[in-house]
Image: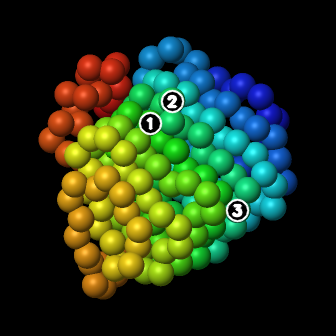
Amino acid sequence: MPGGTILVTEGGVFIFKPTASNNIRLESASGSLINFSIIFDDSNPNAFDVEIKEKLSPDITIADNVDLGGVFFKADKATCDVTLIVGDNVTNDTWKSGSGNDAIILGDNFVINSTFATNNGDDTITIGENATGSFDTGGGTDTVITRDPTATINNAENRASARRNRGRHGGRRRHGARAFRRRHGCQRHR
Ligand SMILES: [Ca+2]
Ligand SMILES: [Ca+2]
C-alpha cells in the first residue's frame, strides 16, 4: 500500500501488509460518512502513522499475536465512531481516537507502548487479562470492563471487573450514540 492520502469509499477494506512502512492518511472520498474496514493480520516491524480523518467510521481488526509496536493509530480528529477489535498477545505503539462513541475490545496480554486514549464521546473499552500500559477514556460517559484488576484506567465513569473470558462481545452502543451521530453527520445508513 502506498503512503500519503487515500480517499476512502463506503465498504472499503484496507489490509496492511507486513512490509507497509509509509504514513497513511485516510479521508472520506464523498465528504459524508463512510463505513470501512482496516485489517492487520501480520506483525509489522516498521514505525508509521495510520491517520483517520473526520466523517470516517472504521472497523479496525488486529489478529492474535500481531506486533505493531511502531504503529500510531492517529484518529483523534475523527468525529465518528471507531471500532477496534484486538486479538490476544498484541502490541501497539499509540492509539488515539476522537469525539465519537468508540467501541474497543482488547484481548489478553495487550501491550500499549505509549498512549491509549479515546478522548471525548461515550467510549466503551473491554480489556483482557494482563494488560500493559495505561488507558485514558477522556471526556464523556465512558465504560471500561476489565479482566485485569491492576490495569491503570483514567476517566472511566463506569468500571467493572470481569473474572472470566466470556468471549468477545461487540461493544454495546450507548443510548446517546444515534443522536450523537446525527448531530455530527455520523448517522449510519443501513
Ligand atoms: Ca470518552
Ligand atoms: Ca471517543
| Disc with the residue nearer the chain's start (1 vs 2) | 2
Q: Earlier in the sequence, mark 3 or mark 1?
A: 3
Question: Which numbered disc flags the more N-terminal residue, 3 or 2?
Answer: 3
- Say which amino acid is labelled 1: Gly
Report the front residue among 112 and 14. 112
Q: Which residue is mark 2?
A: 77
The residue at which mark 1 appears reads as 98
Please tell me which residue is depicted at 63% across the width and 67% down the height of the picture. 91
Query: Helix, strand, or loop for circle 3?
Result: strand
Q: Disc 2 residue type?
A: Lys
Q: Would residue 102 be visible to someone looking at this image?
A: no
Q: Are marks 1 and 2 in contact (CB under 8 Å)?
A: yes
Report the residue marked by disc 3: 69
Say whether mark 2 is within 8 Å of ligand 2.
no
Question: For mark 2, does the 10 Å Cα neighbourhood hold few (<14), some (14 to 19), or many (20 or more) residues?
Answer: some
Give the distance between the C-alpha atoms of the residues marked 3 and 2, in whole angstroms.
22 Å
Q: Is mark 1 within 8 Å of ligand 2?
A: yes
- Percent x, y of residue 151: 41, 73
Taking depth in this image into account, of 38 and 161 the one nearest to the observer is 161
Q: Residues within 10 Å of mark 1 (few under 14, many from 20)?
A: many
Image quadrant of residue 65? bottom right
Is residue 37 depicted above or below 188 in this figure? Answer: below
Indicate the secondary structure of the residue bearing disc 2.
Answer: loop
Q: Position of residue 126 (x, y in %)?
A: 35, 65
Extreme residue in the bottom direction: 164
